[in-house]
Amino acid sequence: MHKPRIVVAGGGYAGLAAIRVLHGRDEVDILLVDPSPVHQLIPELPTALREGGSVREHTLPFDDLLKDTGVRRREDAVRRVQSAEKRVVLDSGDEIAFDWLIVCAGSTTRWPPIPGLREHAYPFRTALDAQALRDRLAGHHDLMVVVLGGGLTGVELAGELATQHHVRIVEIASRILPEVGPGLARYADRVMRQKGVAISPSAKVRRVETNRLLMDGGDAASYDVLVWTGGIAPPDVAWAGVELDDHGYPVADEWGMVASSVFVAGDTYIVRRRGEVVPQSAQLAEEAGAFVARTILARIKDGQAGPPFDPHFKGLLVALDSHRGVGWVMRKGLAVKGYSARALKGLVFSQYRYRLGASFPDATTDD
């Protein structure tokens, strides 16, 4: 009897959440396609820049996670989705047929057209990015590190680096952390400045040169190391038979479906709730991955999809350093800051690892 093959393209938070729902079910055949041998705990990566830290501490090998689950794995990347033919083309040139496809291939670094930016800046999005930056900083102290982007990643990275280096955040918005309320942003600004982090709001970079930034208004800033945290772009996937929006993302319905038998999750899925785009996060990716997997199982069983995706937010937490943080929790947005916010952030990390351990008992951290 033919088992429906479900191809999961991407083993990030969404992909593993989907596999947690799917594995152990005899009625389906599951194949994970991911170019990396490890699951990357991306929200934890700023802490890998601490003195004595390690990027490897924030990755989990797929071989350990998927051991004895029956899930097959292909170390490759999906580069083209042929929805009508129900086939994907891999980076290697090989093609794989599917009955159902979940594309959760993450994202790529968004590089705006600023001359010199891509040539001089270190991106910070993946474990490989974190390792490259860590290698650059190794053996040095008191470097001038300029972080371009004062959002969640930029602020967390600046907070970690400030213990060893001179750090400056350059942000195009009028304040850092535009994702949180003004009061929490002011608290974060105060903590950052207490740590010695210089903050340049409302600053637009127009050109990057070796060891120097040129900004609108004639201002300039020097740097030893430049880090870009200013945004993400769709994954490098070509879509045949799938409508794309103005930014290159596949247009999904309320169930995450972009074509017959083809679904998206994670950063590839632009989720809208009451007409507003939901900010992408690991929490949303995990929830969407599990939802899409359950939707596919329901359609295999009786052709019904169930109710549409309605994400349930648990909160947003930002680490300012190893002791303090800001954010909000619960759906009504209870503001938290200081030690309690940082402790809650650590608890979120621990809970995620616990869920993985419960779903994949052979998973280990390769310290």
Image (cartoon, rainbow, N blue to C red):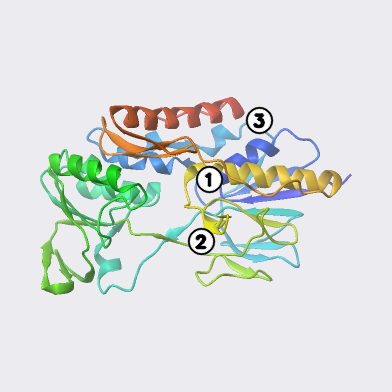
> In the image, residue 133 lies at what x, y percent?
27, 50
Amino acid type, mark 2: Pro
> In the image, residue 127 lies at what x, y percent?
39, 46
Please give the name of the residue rendered at 14% of the width and 58% of the height, measured from the top-left corner: 223
Of 323 and 38, which appears nearest the observer?
Answer: 323
Q: Is residue 218 above or below residue 342?
A: below
Q: Is residue 194 above or below residue 305?
A: above
Q: Nearer the viewer, mark 1 or mark 3?
A: 1
Please give the name of the residue rendered at 14% of the width and 73% of the height, measured from the top-left corner: 217
Q: Is residue 331 above or below residue 246?
A: above
Of label 1 and label 2, which has the lower sequence position?
A: 2
Residue 68 - label:
3
Q: Residues within 10 Å of mark 3 (few under 14, many from 20)?
A: few
Q: Residue furthest right?
A: 1
> What is the number of callouts on the image?
3
Residue 118 - label:
none
Of helix, strand and loop, which one carries label 2?
loop
Of helix, strand and loop, which one carries label 1?
helix
Q: Residue beneath label 2, please? A: 235
The Cα atoms of the two marked residues, 3 and 2, are separated by 30 Å
Q: Residues within 10 Å of mark 1 (few under 14, many from 20)?
A: many
Of label 3 and label 2, which has the lower sequence position?
A: 3
Q: Residue beneath label 1, please? A: 284
Q: Which image quarter: residue 324?
A: top left
Task: Using residue 352 as the reference point, say whether residue 343 is left or right of it.
Answer: left
> In the image, residue 57 lies at what x, y percent?
38, 34
The Cα atoms of the two marked residues, 1 and 2, are separated by 17 Å
Please give the name of the residue rendered at 60% of the width and 35% of the height, measured from the top-left corner: 66
Residue 152 in sight here: yes
Task: Using residue 165 as the reference point, say whether residue 81 is left or right of it.
Answer: right
